[in-house]
Amino acid sequence: MEKVAVVGAGIGGLAAAIRLAKAGADVTVFEANSSAGGKINNLQLGEFRFDMGPSVFTAPQYIQELYELCNEDFSSFSYKKLDVPFHYFFEDGTKMKMYSDREKLLNEFETVLGENPKKLDKYLTKAEKNYNYITPLFIETSLQTVSEWMNIKLIKALTRLPHYKLNATMDEENKKTFSNPKTRQIFNRFATYNGSDPYKAPAMLNMIAHLELTDGVFLPENGMVQITQELYKLALKQGVAFHFNEKVDEIYTLDEKVKGLRTKKNIYDFDAVFSNMDVGFTYEKLLPTSPKPEKILTQEKSSSAMVFYWGVNAQFEELAVHNMFFSDDYPAEFKSIFDTKTLPDAPSIYVHITSKEKQEDAPQGKENWFVMINVPINTGQNWEEYREKARSYILEKLSKSLHVDLSKKIEEEFVMDPVYIEHTYFGKAGSIYGNASNNKFAAFYRHPNASKTIKGLYFVGVTVHPGGGIPLALNSAKIAVETWRKLRS
Ligand SMILES: Cc1cc2nc3c(=O)[nH]c(=O)nc-3n(C[C@H](O)[C@H](O)[C@H](O)COP(=O)(O)OP(=O)(O)OC[C@H]3O[C@@H](n4cnc5c(N)ncnc54)[C@H](O)[C@@H]3O)c2cc1C
């Protein structure tokens, strides 16, 4: 039986462990922290429970796939589709709701923003088609071998080439399509779902809107952490062994072949290693003497985040589970994040409140607020100063918008910034998704799921192919394990 180690129990690592065990490997997961889940984590402050990392759950079919692989009943995974997942707020007082029902959605865009429903419907249909053509090629397939490209999926995807608008940015295409700048801002925001800049990212990424606006946004009954807790249980059932609080310090190799790994507790022999650690750190910390794919590792990094977790002593009718308070100057916000690497002066603010659907997450009459702004990666900025500045700005903006002195309503508080992300989850420079997708070749500069130089070394998670977000991390595991199967057969 082949002995395989997985470094890290993030969602990518868990999915890889399940797939490897099902394929007959003897699997051991090493996790530096005390529990599984990585950035999908819970925070308890007094009587308030918070989702600590990801909050938007899309494409549950990829979780279902893992259940089915293990012959488990997916109906035991309780989650619901949100009817009105987002409320949007603009600086001038405009408010609108994002309905999951297409008719209602088109009507809301027409009533509030004056958008032509036919045009919007066409845009969403195109996003869906692009997504369906591109997914089998870029998201469910390895880009590593030419043979994988020479197939019917590629030919089909190429027939839609003009629709991808390869030479335009997301913003350029959205500007051409929508008359109202607010609509453009709503659609440009989807660039942030993989930590990118809509004024640079290719228009093809406009297809991300499909996942949220057509497929829908879901909420696991017990919070986002339910996803990884359930995958952890599935992994245990498949016989996967877990070593918690055991950080891997080195992957050791001989003659360009993986031999095992080293932790502070022991040296272990393995036939293959799957790294769910940020790919940049995997090379830097675990393989310090191996040649590095410099071109890939030096690409521009994705954005990071600053999150204020607030236990709020009040309830707000006008807020939903997901809320966006847009800034007036979106281009300036992305310039700060990607060009000057400074705190945006007036960032857009995202507020996530699970107690809207799950009252147990906050005491009676109160709410659990996850308040996030996008920020640059850590390049040594004064984060203490930025935290204070961001906090004041957010409190002022939300107080004004909600007609309340929010500073008097905060009972509990915790703050996460890029330095915390870097230290707690080993995400290089606090980047959330590894490389950004700020140019049309970015997909080809993501690290592949198998090493080209070290036999037996594989990579999973959001910092490698196919990219950022839970659905893509799950696909990274699928591709990596399929590549492992092929290479050993
Ligand atoms: C604030 C925030 C909001 C986000 N919002 C969303 C969202 O709404 N939707 C979405 O889909 N995604 C979102 N993301 C991105 C999200 O984190 C990913 O989708 C996903 O959780 C990442 O999974 P992963 O498997 O790549 O790695 P991680 O979750 O980063 O897991 C890596 C694991 O490896 C462990 N590890 C690292 N190095 C070692 C080592 N040397 N030895 C042992 N263990 C090690 C770490 O401790 C960690 O547990 C968000 C992220 C953040 C931080």
Image (tube, rainbow, N blue to C red):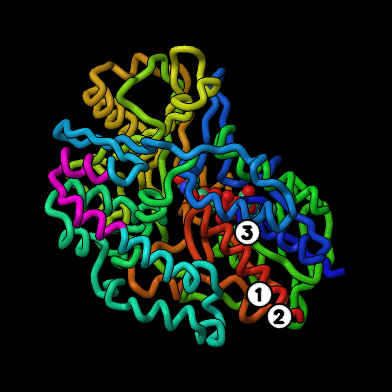
- Disc ID at residue 487: 2
Q: Please report contact status of discs 1 and 3: CB closer than 8 Å, yes or no.
A: no
SS at mark 3?
A: loop
Give the amino acid at mark 2: Leu
Q: Decide whether the magenta segment is chiefly helix, strand or loop.
A: helix
- CB of mark 3 within 8 Å of CB of mark 2? no
Q: In the rendered image of this protein, does residue 149 appear above or below residue 318?
A: below
Q: Residues within 10 Å of mark 3 (few under 14, many from 20)?
A: many
Cα separation, mark 1 vs mark 3, equals: 16 Å
CA gap, disc 3 to disc 2?
20 Å
Write down the region rendered in magenta: 105-124
Label 1 close to label 2 by CB (< 8 Å): yes
Local packing at callout 1 (Cα closer than 10 Å; few below 14, some 14-19, many 20+) is some
**Front residue (pair 261, 329):** 329
The residue closer to the viewer here, 178 or 7, is 178
- In the foreground, 114 or 240: 114
The residue carrying mark 1 is 483
For the C terminus, which image quadrant?
A: bottom right
Q: Residue at x 63, y 56 (%)?
A: 65
Lower position in the chain sequence, tag 3 or tag 2? 3
Q: Secondary structure at mark 2?
A: helix
Q: Specify which label sits upstream in the sequence, 1 or 3.
A: 3
